[in-house]
Each structure stands twice: as C-alpha cells, then as structure tokens.
Image (cartoon, helix red, strand yellow):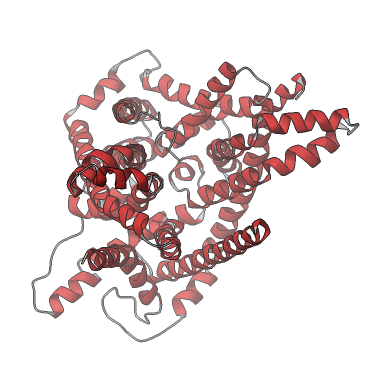
Amino acid sequence: MTANKKSYSIPFILWIIAGTVIPLASIAYYGFTSREGGFTFANIAAMFRGDHMQALGLSLSLALISTAICLVLAFPMAMILRESKYGKQGFLIFVIILPMWMNFLLRTMAWQVLLERQGVINAIITAIGLPRQEMMNTPGAIVLGMVYDFLPFMILPIYNTVSKIDNHLIEAAYDLGATKGKVYTRVILPLSVPGIVSGITMVFIPALTTFVISNMLGGGKINLIGNIIEQEFTVNSNWYLGSGLSLVMMVFIIFSMLMLQKFDKTGGANLI
Amino acid sequence: MKKTLGRIYILIIMLFLYLPILTLIVLSFNDVKSMSVWGGFSLHWYAELFQSRLMMGAIVNTFSIAILAALIATIVGTLAVLGMASMKPRTQNVLLGFNNIPMLNADIVTGIALMLFFLMIKAPRGYMTILFSHATFCIPYVILSVRPRVNKNTDRLYEAALDLGATEKYAFRKIVLPELKPGIMSGFLLSFTMSVDDFIITYFTRGAGINTISTLIYSEVKIGIRPSLFALSTIIFVVALAVLLIANIRQDKANNLKDARAA
C-alpha cells in the first residue's frame, strides 16, 4: 500500500499518548510528589508502613492461594475437555463461558447471599441441626469469591493449549514405554506451559489488585492492597500516596510477569 | 471407571459454577425479602427493578457507552492496523508494545491513571470521560483481532486492482475490507462485551450522578442487598444465555454451510 497510508495510524498514536502514556506518567508524577508539591520518595516508602505491608502480604498470599486452587481445578477440567467428543466439548465450553457473561459483581454478590449469617448455607446447616457458621468477612470467603470469579480464565487458556497437543506424541510416548505418570509429567505438562502461564496471569493479577471482592465478601474489615489504594483515591483524596502505592504494586506485577515469562518460551503469544 | 470419574468431576465444577446463580434466580421470585425463607412466588422485585429510574438510566448508559466505545475503538484500531502495515517492523513493534500496556496493566492502575489525567486537564468527569476510557481499553483488542488478517496477499491483490484501473476507494472496499471483515467483527464484539462488563475503570473515571449497571450494583450492594438485584441477575443471565445460544447456532449453521460447500 502507498506510503501516505501511514497517516491512518495517527488517531491511534494520539489515543495512545492521551489514553496511556500521559495518564501513566501522571501516576509517576503524583507518586514522586509530596502534598506540598516538592519531590519526595515518601509515597513510595509508605508501602513499608506496617498496615500497608500487612495488606500487601495478605493480598499476595490470597492471590497465590486462589491462583493455585484455580490451577488445580482447571487442569483436570481442561484434560477432560480435550478428551470429550466434539459435540459434548462445545456444550461444556459453552457452559464454562456463560457465567463470564454475567456481571462479576452479581456473581460475587451471589456468594454473599450464600455465606451470610442469615444466608442460604446457614439456613441449610441449622435446618439439619448444626450450629450456625460465621463464613462471611473471612479470608476464606475472599478466596472462594476469587476462585469463583476467575476459574473460567484459568480453564480456557489451558484448554486452548492442551487441545492442540498432537495425539501422536502421547501415543509415541506410550509406545516407547512411558508410564501414565511419565506421559503427564514429561509430555503433556511441558506442552501446556504456555496455557498455564497465561491462565496464571489472568487470575493472579486481578486477584492481587482486587478491591471489589474483598469489599463485598470481607465486609470492609479485611484490607487488601487494592482496598488501600482505592480508599486513598475515593475516601482520603490523597492521590499522592495512592499513586505511590500504585507504582510499587505495578513493580510487583511486572516482576511477577517477568518471572512467569521465563517459563513460557513462546513469549506470551497465548495471552489472549 | 475413568469416564465416571470424569463425569463426577464435570458435575462438581458445574454445580460450583451454577448453584450460586441458580440461588439468585430462585430468590428473585421470592415474595419476602429474605435469603433463607421462602415466602411464596412473586414478581414484585421485577416490578421494582423496572420502576427504578436509576436502574433504567444505568442500563441505557451501559449499552450506549458500549456501542459507541466499540465503534470508536473499531474505527481507530482498524485504521491503525492499515497504517502500521506500511511501517518498518521496528516501528510496528514499538507501537504494539504500547498497545499491550492497557491489556497487561491491572484495571485499577489503568482506572487511576485515567482519573488523574482527567483531573489534570480539568475535564469534568461524566459520560464522555467514561466513553474515552472505554475506547482506550478496547482499541488494543481491536488491533489484536484485525492485525492477523492483514498480509502480503491483501497488498498484492490491492495493487493488482489498482493496476487494473480500480480507484483506491473501490479497491479498498472490494479487496481490503472483505479480507479484514471477520477481524473487525470480532474486535467490535470483544470491545462491546469488555465495555459492558467493566466496573473498575468506570468506577474511577465516572463522575457523581452517572451510573452504569456495574457501578449502580456496587453502590446498592454496599447499602444492602435488595432482591431487585436478584431480578436483575436473572434477566442478565437469561439474556446472556439467549445471545450465546443464538451465536452458537449461527456458528454451527455457518460451519455446516462451509462443509457443504467444501464437499
């Protein structure tokens, strides 16, 4: 195509500048600026304050636990999907995608309805004569919400990669005398790494940064790092501190993604 | 044995995914405002939902923003792909790198960044800022779905059409556009669904007094869950089910047609 076609990209380039570059630069600007307007590292260093460190630690551990549970639940499902017949496969994928189309706030609310003191599960428990359980406002409730909301994002990318594994490779491994366990650990698992990596990315990052699930299922009593940042912007109106904390969180995300990329030799080509 | 285990596993996952949704659907028809006592069948939570002007306004906002954002993103993204085709690979890679940022960034960071940007340029936050933000996070998805459709062959056919006397416009309409169409369509649909589903970025870029379905749900849940939200869940679930079913049936039909032609 002719050279002047390049100008077609101009709206896009302007949009990137206005929508991505300048906004991210302003986070960096506010993050290194004090309330009085001078340069400071205080907003960054604030991450090491006790309550912030506690929130970050809790976020990391809850996100890691949820990601691990999603992975353990998703891998067998992806393998079952791979081995089912064409028609059944289509139906199962349909059933996994459908909940993703429901607003995730409503899906999280559903767990509130189930776990509440006066909720559905407690009604069943007390009906069979067991004592009422306090399930809401616990880290467990938050993990449950995360797993429920993000499980499809783990199943689908893993299914995408395992469905492409050539059956001949697996047969060849058996022919050469591999046991079932060996076939899984030496053939199937290594070949599904790209899917696992993108699944982990798609679950871990939203789980690490969420403030919605912790707010709805933690009753505002459990603060994750997402809640702290959100409150700095909406309640305390301290954009400087909020930006500083966001910068540190971004570093965490970039660092964990780089670690993950090491495992994935396709360089994240399967991310979507 | 293995088959039974597989079936049991599928059943467990299905129950996990659908029991919470089913609970909401059942409770939406409950006459009393209780999460554990059944007080008889009633539709009055649906009536309450449809009488809520806040909710109706939020529904209109959600869908108009989604359609406009998807349209803007599709146009800007498709043009970008066409322009990038005649750039050096290095420049293309730089642009694609920037393009990936909103997709890889956590939503909360994208939302905060845009909010700070609007505050800095003193743009009043409302409908337009939400629309701008949604288009911002939709463009990358359009580019990623359209770009694979541009290839050397399109270029050659386009040149050939020009050599044979077609005007640029005509060649574009007859050669380039049909080649890109599937990518453009999926980019638009992806953008639309991402926009409808978004909460976090909208939350930070909206002003007071404007709501989408997501932000309204969030503020209502914070005050206390009302059964009209169960009614809303039921409606959204049924609509999603219908849309996906229709899409699947059409896909099947298209596949059958293709098979028939191939045979």
Query: A232 above or below B97?
Result: below
Q: Percent position (x, y) of residue B67?
A: 63, 50
Residue A262's place in the image compared with A118, above or below, is above
> Can residue B226 be seen in this snapshot?
yes
Spot the residue most to the bottom.
Answer: B40
- Locate the C terminus of chain B and report the quarter of the image it occupies: bottom right
Q: Quadrant of residue A80?
A: bottom left
**Number of numbered discs on residues:** 0
* Residue located 30% across and 47% down the image: A171
What residue lies at 30% left-to-right and 46% top-to-bottom?
Answer: A170
Quick one: A100 or B167, which is closer to the camera? Answer: B167
User: Which of these two is toward me, A121 or B38?
Assistant: A121
Q: Give left or right: position of A118 versus A191.
A: left
Specify whether B64 is left or right of B5: right
Q: Quadrant of residue B23?
A: bottom left
State whether residue A37 is above or below residue B75.
above
Residue at point 14%, 62% (across, down): A134
Q: In the rendered image, which quarter contains the N terminus of chain B?
A: bottom left
